[in-house]
Image (tube, rainbow, N blue to C red):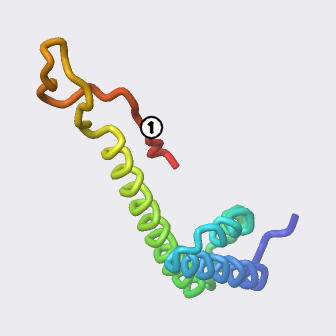
Amino acid sequence: MTTPNNSDMKPLISKLSAVLDQETQLVNSGDFDASFALQAEKNELIADFQSRVSQLDKSAKSGLADAFEDLNRLLSANMSALAMARDISTGIIKRVADVVNGPRATNSYGANAKKPTGPLPARRGIAVDKGF
């Protein structure tokens, strides 16, 4: 296998930049299904990029400094958009869980023919996976 150089990296950086930009735009517009469809391609490009960068010598890396800086800006914007989408969805799930697990008004009477006072114990729940 030959060591990659600047000319090998530029098309890869261009493809990765285009996919990141497209995904960021889709997430910002709320089209999560379309953004999800880009995941396999993005992951493949990132793996290829990481592999090639690890093989570059110092002079090749310095020759790509501007391209790396542009890519870093796109990555930051992409990560911000994905984090915002995750925070919004987590907030929605938490509100649903709070409503489902919240106090309920009773519709029954106790042994003394009076409505019980205080909240009833929760009998149903919802699980939230924060690791997605």
Secondary element at image label 1: loop
Nearest to the observer: residue 125 or residue 41: 125
Picture coordinates of residue 90, whole percent (x, y): 41, 54
Residue drawn at 26 percent across, 31 percent down:
107
One can see residue 3 in this view = yes
Query: Relative to 15, is 102 above or below?
Result: above
**In this rendering, position of residue 94 left or right of residue 111:** right
Nearest to the observer: residue 88 or residue 124: 124
Picture coordinates of residue 70, whole percent (x, y): 54, 84
**In this rendering, position of residue 119 left or right of residue 11:** left
Residue drawn at 13 percent across, 29 percent down:
118
One can see residue 62 in this view = no
Picture coordinates of residue 20, whole percent (x, y): 61, 76
Nearest to the observer: residue 57 or residue 71: 71
Q: In which quarter of the image is the N terminus?
A: bottom right
In the rendered image, which quarter is residue 15 located in? bottom right
Question: Which residue has dot 1 on it?
Answer: 127
Residue drawn at 44 percent across, 59 percent down:
89
Residue drawn at 15 percent across, 18 percent down:
113
Picture coordinates of residue 124, whole percent (x, y): 39, 31
Amino acid type indicated by mark 1: Ala
Outermost residue, top side: 111
Q: Which class describes the residues within 10 Å of circle 1: few (<14), some (14-19), or many (20+)?
A: few
In the rendered image, which quarter is residue 109 located in? top left
Outermost residue, front side: 113
Looking at the rendered structure, the number of numbered marks drawn on it comes to 1
